[in-house]
Amino acid sequence: MNRAKVDILGYGVDTFCFNEAVDYIYQTHGQVVTINPEMIEYGNKNSEFKNLINNAELVVPDGIGVKVGLKILGTSVERIPGIDLGKAILKRAQYLKKTVALVGAQQDVIENAVVNLKFEMADLNIVYYRDGYFTDENEVKQELLSKSPDVVLVALGSPKQEFFINSIKKQLPESVFIGLGGSFDVWAGKVKRAPKIFRNLGLEWLYRIVTEPERIKRVFPTLPLFIIKVIKERLLKK
Ligand code: UDP
C-alpha cells in the first residue's frame, strides 16, 4: 500500500479510506496524526509542530473542517474520526494478539476506560496504562520502553500528545502511536458522544459546543478562518 497525500495549506493529508488506514497502520508503524483545523492553526505558529505533522507516518482527516477544506481544493476524502480509528486499531490489536498501552486522561477516567474496553474486547492485551497528569515524562517513557507495546494510544490533548509521541517513537520503531484527544473520556462514559445524526451530518463539533460551551473559543474563529484561507488558496490556484 502506498500513501497518496494531498496538500492543504502546507500540510500533507493521507487519502486512505477508513479501512485502508487501519491496514496501513499495521503495515507501517510510527506516528498517526488525526489532523484538524486547530492543529493546522497551531502549526502555523509553531514550525516544530508543523514539521512533526508533515513527518508523521500517517495523517488522517479527523474533523469536518479538513474534509470540507480538501473538497474545496478538489479532493474528496473520507473523514476518519480519531475515536473511531482508535477503536478499530484496538479491535485489530485484539485479533492480531498485539500488546496495547494507553496513556492519558484523569486517573478515574483511564481506569474506567480500561474496564470498559476489556468488557468490550475480552482478549485485548493491555500491558500498560497510566493517567495523563504525570510530572515526570521520562518516567512514563521508560515504562513504555520497558513494556514495548505494539500499540500506544495517547490522549493528552493536542499538541501535547503529538509532541509526546514524537519524542518516543524512534525508540520504539516497531510500535504504532496515535494521539486521541478526549477519546478516553468517551470510552470511560464520562463524556457522551454526539448522537449519530450529528455525526453523520458532520456536526459533531456543534454538538460538543452545545454540551461544552467553553469549546466555542477553540472552534471560533479557527474553523471559519481556516475555510476562508482554503478558499483563498483555491482561488490563487486557478
Ligand atoms: N489530558 C491529559 N493530560 C493533560 C491535559 C489533558 O491527560 O495534561 C487529557 C484530558 O483529561 C482529556 C484529553 O487529554 O482526556 C484532552 O481532551 P480534549 O477534549 O481537550 O482533546 P481534543 O480531542 O479536543 O484535542
Image (cartoon, grey):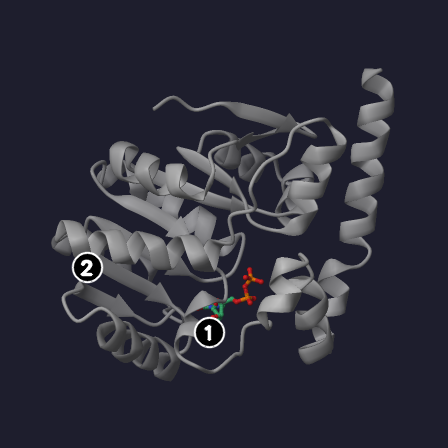
Image-based side of 158 in relation to 88, left or right: right
Taking the image as drawn, is residue 99 in sight? Answer: no
Distance, label 2 to label 1, CA atoms, is 25 Å
Q: Label 2: which residue?
A: 143
Q: Label 1: which residue?
A: 186
Image-based side of 195 in relation to 98, left or right: right
The reply to whether dot 2 and dot 1 touch (C-beta < 8 Å) is no
In the image, what residue occupies the spot 68% across and 71% down?
207
Return the residue nearer the eye: 156 or 23. Answer: 23
Residue 188 locus on image (x, y percent): 39, 79
Q: Quadrant of the N terminus?
A: top left
Q: Quadrant of the C terminus?
A: top right
Whether ligand 1 has any atom under 8 Å from the Cβ at mark 1 is answered as no
How crowded pointer 1 is (Cα within 10 Å; few <14, some 14-19, many 20+) is rated as some
In the image, what residue occupies the spot 47% across and 34% down?
16
In the image, what residue occupies the spot 49% across and 23% down?
4
Image-based side of 228 in relation to 154, left or right: right
Amino acid type at mark 2: Glu
Amino acid type at mark 1: Val
In the image, what residue occupies the spot 72% across and 67% down?
206
Q: Quadrant of residue 197?
A: bottom right
Residue 193 locus on image (x, y percent): 54, 72
Count the marks: how many?
Answer: 2
Q: Secondary structure at mark 1?
A: helix
How crowded pointer 2 is (Cα within 10 Å; few <14, some 14-19, many 20+) is rated as few
Return the residue nearer the eye: 12 or 200. Answer: 200
